[in-house]
Image: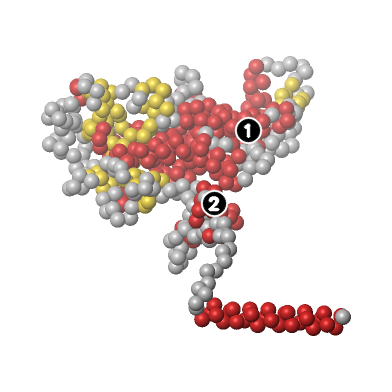
Amino acid sequence: MTFSPDELTNEAGVRLYGSGYAKQLNPVPTRGWYPLIREPFSGAWQQNLEEKRGTVLCYPTLYACISRISQDVGKLPFLLKKEDSNGIWQVDRGNTSYWPVLRKPNHYQTAQQFREAWMLSKLIHGNTYVLKRRDARGVVDAMFVLDPCRVKPLVSDTGDVFYELSAGNRHDSVSDISTTENVIVPAREIIHDRLNTFHHQLIGVPPLCAAHWPAVKNLKILRTSAEFFENKAQPGGILTAPAGMSDDDAVRVQNFWQQNYTGQNAGKVAVIGADLKYQGFATSAADSQLVEQMRYSDEQICQPFGIPPFIIGIGTIPAGMKVDDMANMYYQFALQAHIEAMEYLLDEGLGVTRPQGIEIDLDPLLRMDQEKRANVVNTLVSGKVMIPNEGRQQFGLPPTAGGDTLWGQNQDYPLGMLADRAEWDPAMQPKPEPTEPVVDANSESAKEEVKRLSAELWQRKALEATREAINA
């Protein structure tokens, strides 16, 4: 991307790079955590007592918090979705404008590395600046995460926001900008993600600001412990001379002792003359409570990042908490705000409007074990919430015939329909009263029936007459 004076002009035609526009823009005050190299007291750097940002970031707990969040956000892929007529968001695989930049944001980073760089800049500096590159259609085809230490927000007299990109930020062609001067670009060409804006709405304050001093304290403890063990874990002591000693003799003995019986020489046999006696200082880890101090500081470091300490191996997991419960807690307290901010900023920065939208897929983060997933999917399918093919897709299985239909048993009816069952179910309707059949006396069947009944009546009377004769 090459910026020219004709391209970088505002609505009034004012030049947006170089010194010609600097008088009309006011830099935003950068109080708070900026820069990130501080002195604990005036003149500390001359005494080699300052703690630089790179040193503090190497502290294990602080490193674990930053890397844990950045890597977990990095492994969650971008999804371009579209809302259908039913209000359901489905993955839009047919769009060709936004998918390329979501799959490959630039020529030197994968999408995962891009998300990690985004989060690292935000967590360490409090601000992430992403420069957009557009093609001939005006569609964003590349995005570059800039060095936040070399980007300065500017506000014009009319309230418009611009960003000055330092020439030192472009010592190579990584960001694809070819210019040797500072460049001022309008806010529409920068995606600016920022954390807590305590001092100014354009300047974010990172969690590293709150975690700085606990990390420095533990670093000093670790450095002291390293020196202690370098001395073969032997505590210091004191040399005493009962007869007294001049200052020059004391300095000479002190230098002799340090050169011959400390550091790599600790533990050697010392031969002491002039009635000198050595008395060691016996201290234990229980007396100094180093473990408790470091654990307390580690918990303080986790607080500004919102990470439960047990996520990075500090302390113990609460009783009764399952793996998916821990993942949900971690997502809610440490990741959700960053993920939501990234989704909204990408929608706005890439010009994605409804019914389309960019989402970050949470499935790689909130995965359950196979048995629990199977039980959940089975419950959703049997409860008519999910079709069978959607359940099979959860386990990487191909669709099956009839799997796109919600199935239910035949005897299942709505309760309201069962209340009116007598109106539609023949089994619930009352049976009609039986009626005597109407017979035509002149029909052949009626005449045959009369003959049969007459013969039956004659036989009955003859049988009764015979019975009476026998009895008499």
Residue 35: image quadrant is top left
Please state if 114 lies on the left or on the right of 233 as rendered. left
Residue 394: where, in percent of width, then height?
49, 57
Query: In the current view of this chain or complex, which residue is farthest to the right?
Result: 472
Q: Nearer the viewer, mark 2 or mark 1?
A: 2
Q: Is residue 64 above or below residue 300?
A: below
Residue 227 in sight: no
Residue 352: image quadrant is top left
Residue 90 in sight: yes
Please state if 434 lies on the left or on the right of 341 as rendered. right
- Dots 2 and 1: beta carbons under 8 Å? no
The Cα atoms of the two marked residues, 2 and 1, are separated by 64 Å
Amino acid type shown at disc 2:
Leu
SS category of the residue bearing label 2? helix
Residue 421: where, in percent of width, then height?
53, 53
Residue 469: where, in percent of width, then height?
83, 82
Q: Residue beneath label 1, please?
A: 295
Tell me what residue is drawn at x 25 percent, y 35 percent: 188
SS category of the residue bearing label 1? helix
Q: Quadrant of the C terminus?
A: bottom right
Amino acid type shown at disc 1:
Arg
Q: Quadrant of the N terminus?
A: top left
Tell me what residue is drawn at x 38 percent, y 39 percent: 342
Numbered label attached to residue 418:
2
Residue 468: where, in percent of width, then height?
82, 79
| Front position in the image: 440 or 134 | 440
Please state if 159 lies on the left or on the right of 13 as rendered. right
Please state if 32 lies on the left or on the right of 237 as rendered. left
Q: How is the image coloured?
A: secondary structure
Residue 162: image quadrant is top left
